[in-house]
Amino acid sequence: MVIGRRMSVDRLPAYIIAQFAGAFAAAAAVYLIFGDSIVRYEEIHGIVRGAPESVKTAMMFGEFYPNPGVGAAASVSTHTAILTEGIGTFILVFLIFTLTEGCNLGRPDNMMAPLFIGLTVTLIISVTAPITQTGINPARDLSPRLFSMLLGWDRAALSHGWYGSLTVYVGGPIAGAGLASLVFTRIVEPLMKTKTSTDSCKCD
């Protein structure tokens, strides 16, 4: 793991494209493996793919709010869903910054960073999954959602239409990640640099 080195802006488009393409390919792989079982489940339960009730199988690919598995008593507004996704993504991205910052002399060993990141994702999912099913990554939600739309789920693959799907699962994580980046680079990182010498860390 490279500590304290940030991606250059010119490499960002390729990184974003790779993320979305990878998530789309992963969704295709899931369907190749479980497609027959999904079709059988729909037959047993009388689910017509593309109809509103097909959200029960569409949720394999995209997130929905409120979580369809919670029950009829669940009530989550779009604003609450956006806030939930934003906070979850903020926590994850901020933690990644702290674990990979060369001037954070209190961070654990580099080899332990993946473990802490994985545990953080687990905790975030445990708290937010009943609310939004936990996307916290635009590529992880949008690409599989588009794939399921192409496979016949159509608008049943959308959570509260395009508005809800894009604002909650794309806009929320982008806002949360952006805010985490600003807080860390503008406030936390400068404080770290003032308390450490250039000989003991690699901040750039």
Image (tube, rainbow, N blue to C red):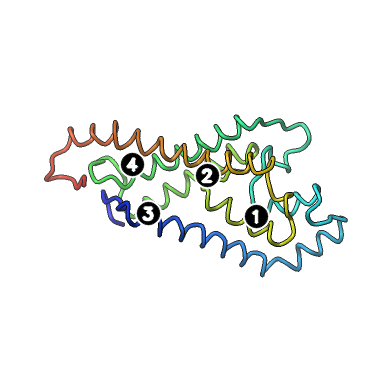
Q: Which residue is mark 4?
A: 98
Residue 119's x, y, as percent?
A: 47, 46
Residue bearing mark 3: 12
Q: Quadrant of residue 48?
A: bottom right
Residue at numbered disc 2: 136
Is 181 situated left or right of 76 in this image?
left
The one of 3 and 155 positioned closer to us in this rendering = 155
Disc 1 residue crowd, few under 14, some 14–19, many 20+, Cα 10 Å: many
Give me the residue at 52% from left, 44% from top. Answer: 136
Q: Secondary structure at mark 4?
A: helix
* C-beta proximity under 8 Å, tags 3 and 4: no
Q: Residue at x 15, y 45 (%)?
A: 200
The kind of residue tagged 1 is: Phe
- Disc nearest the viewer among 3 and 4: 3
What kind of element bears circle 3? helix
Closest to the camera, between mark 1 and mark 4, is: 1
Residue 98: % across, % down: 33, 41
Counting from the top left corner in percent of width and height, residue 36 is at 76, 68
Give the CA distance from mark 3 to mark 4: 21 Å
Q: What is the CA distance from the residue labelled 2 to the residue labelled 4?
A: 18 Å
Q: What residue type is disc 3 on?
A: Leu
Query: Along the polypeptide, which appears first: circle 3 or circle 1?
Result: 3
Tell whether 73 sits left or right of 194.
right
Q: Nearer the viewer, mark 3 or mark 1?
A: 3
Q: Which residue is mark 1?
A: 61
Closer to the chain start, of discs 2 and 3, is 3
Coordinates of residue 185 in the picture (x, y in percent)? 30, 37
Question: Answer yes or no: do the residues labelled 3 and 1 have beta carbons within 8 Å?
Answer: no
Residue 80: give its label. none
Asked whether, in this view, residue 107 is left or right of residue 134, the answer is left
The amino acid type found where label 2 is placed reads: Ile
How far separated are the C-alphas under marks 2 and 3?
Answer: 19 Å
